[in-house]
């Protein structure tokens, strides 16, 4: 009887445990299903909890208000001040020539009837290695006009990624270098199209067969992200016994140093191969051409006109 | 107890956003052994939904769910739980 009772007790306990575990599995499965079915809704709710944390962290790390200044170490602030003074001196020297060039550029664009696309300036409040995923979080959202899939620029023409999700006051930017993120790139030098794979922390890897000559410094463009060179090949990993070689692409400014970005007003659209070729050609022209004054430049057109003039004489 | 859980939950949220995974993981293990941590799975889902929009696999949610389930399954076999019961 005792034996029977203990067996029953163990059995009912096991049944209870099984039911309990099944209920927990169902709960976890429900969460995962919810995440796949309505990611935007879950993300919007998450934004309510996560955005304040990111903003406070950014405020403590970079704000010049009294409290965060106290929190940060004095030495760090002094070093930052010195660095800023140095940068200020550099900028003051370059400011005049920059404004002159900007005016000249505007005038030339006006003459060419060129259109300029507007952009939204945004501060970076979260960046890789400090966040759970390899993404940027910026302090502008749909309220400020940021749209999903809009390109994000780190400089004038340096596209670093696109807006994956735009929330009311923040947006999450997927970087080209996000691990396992694939993009079609064009490498100047060997002049080939290939696929680049993100490696995280600002690094992009291209894999090409051994026969193709990769050189450090070869420029790399991502046509689908619009005009502009993405970066250059900084390291080549080539072992002759292996059928493939790898090139690691990096951008000029490290991701950790990017404080501000600009977001394109229009979202990216899928482009055809013909459009990609046109973009690549445009970039190549931009990269290799130098604005030489007309009276100094000697090209086919001026040669022809000289020859005609000679014939006439 | 509920207040303590809310505070710990907020602490886990802040830690998971600001600290590297190798610090967050042991904290999560302690958390799931300490209480029945439903909220940990929800927090992980929040992180995946917010930051991991471009990633196909919700790593944080799956890891948290696995931790949670394993902890709940193992708890009856752990001496300090059975002693209390």
Image (cartoon, grey):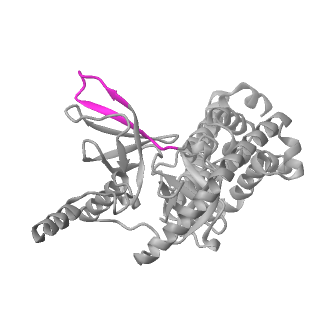
* Left or right of residue A309, residue A6 in this image: right
Q: Position of residue A210 (x, y in %)?
A: 22, 31
Q: Residue at x 67, y 66 (%)?
A: A169
State which quarter of the image contains the N terminus of chain A: top right
Q: Is residue A126 above or below residue A99?
A: above
Q: Does residue A246 appear left or right of residue A200 in this picture?
A: left
- In front: A124, or B77? A124
Q: What stretch of residues is rendered in magenta?
A: A236-252
- Horizontally, residue B84 falls left or right of residue A207, namely right
Above or below, A292 relative to B35: below
Direction left: furthest residue: A311
In the rendered image, residue A270, in percent from the top left (x then y), is placed at 34, 66
Up/down of A177 relative to A171, above or below: above
Along the line of sight, the residue nearer the viewer: B61 or A80: A80
The image shows a total of numbered marks equal to 0
At a point 11% along the width and 71% down the height, the residue shown is A312
- How far across and down, in percent of the image, does residue A245 sit? 29, 31
Which quadrant does the C terminus of chain A fall into? Answer: bottom left
Question: Residue placed at 57% from the left, 58% from the top?
Answer: A172
Q: Is residue A177 magenta?
A: no
Q: Quadrant of residue B22?
A: top right
Q: Residue furthest front?
A: A313
Residue A300 at what x, y percent from top left?
20, 60
Q: Which one is nearer the viewer's eye here, B83 or A178?
A: A178
* A5 horizontally vs A65: left or right: left
Residue name at image x 45 percent, y 71 percent? A108
């Amino acid at each position: 009887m005792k034996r029977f009772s203990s067996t029953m007790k163990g059995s009912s306990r096991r049944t209870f445990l099984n039911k309990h575990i099944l209920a927990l599995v169902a709960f976890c499965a429900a969460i995962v299903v919810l995440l796949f079915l309505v990611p935007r809704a879950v993300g919007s709710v998450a934004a309510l909890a996560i955005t304040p944390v990111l903003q406070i962290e950014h405020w403590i790390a970079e704000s010049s208000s009294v409290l965060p200044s106290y929190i940060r170490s004095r030495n760090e602030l002094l070093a930052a001040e010195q660095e800023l003074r140095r940068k200020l001196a550099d900028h003051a020297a370059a400011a005049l020539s920059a404004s002159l060039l900007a005016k000249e550029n505007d005038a030339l664009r006006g003459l060419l009837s060129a259109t300029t696309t507007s952009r939204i300036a945004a501060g970076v409040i979260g960046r890789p290695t400090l966040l759970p995923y390899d993404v940027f979080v910026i302090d502008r959202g749909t309220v400020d006009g940021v749209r999903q899939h809009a390109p994000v620029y780190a400089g004038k023409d340096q596209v670093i990624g696109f807006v994956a999700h735009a929330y009311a006051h923040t947006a999450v930017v997927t970087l080209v270098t996000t691990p396992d993120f694939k993009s079609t790139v064009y490498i100047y030098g060997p002049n080939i199209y290939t696929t680049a794979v993100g490696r995280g922390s600002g690094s992009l890897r291209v894999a090409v067969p051994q026969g193709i000559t990769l050189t450090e410094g070869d420029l790399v463009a991502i046509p689908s992200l619009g005009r502009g060179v993405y970066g250059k090949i900084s390291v080549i990993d080539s072992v002759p016994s292996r059928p493939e070689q790898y090139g690691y692409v990096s951008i000029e400014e490290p991701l950790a140093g990017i404080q501000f970005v600009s977001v394109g007003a229009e979202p990216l659209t899928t482009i055809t191969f013909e459009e990609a070729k046109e973009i690549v050609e445009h970039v190549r022209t931009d990269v290799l051409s130098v604005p030489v004054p007309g009276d100094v430049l000697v090209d086919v057109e001026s040669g022809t006109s000289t020859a005609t003039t000679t014939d006439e004489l | 107890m509920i207040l303590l859980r809310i505070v710990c939950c907020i602490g886990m949220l802040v830690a998971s956003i600001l600290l590297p995974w190798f610090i967050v993981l042991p904290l999560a293990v302690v958390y799931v052994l300490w209480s029945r941590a439903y909220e940990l799975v929800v927090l992980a889902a929040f992180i995946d939904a917010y930051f991991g929009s471009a990633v196909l696999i919700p790593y944080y949610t799956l890891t948290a769910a696995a931790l949670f389930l394993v902890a709940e399954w193992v708890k009856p076999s752990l001496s300090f739980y059975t002693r209390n019961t």
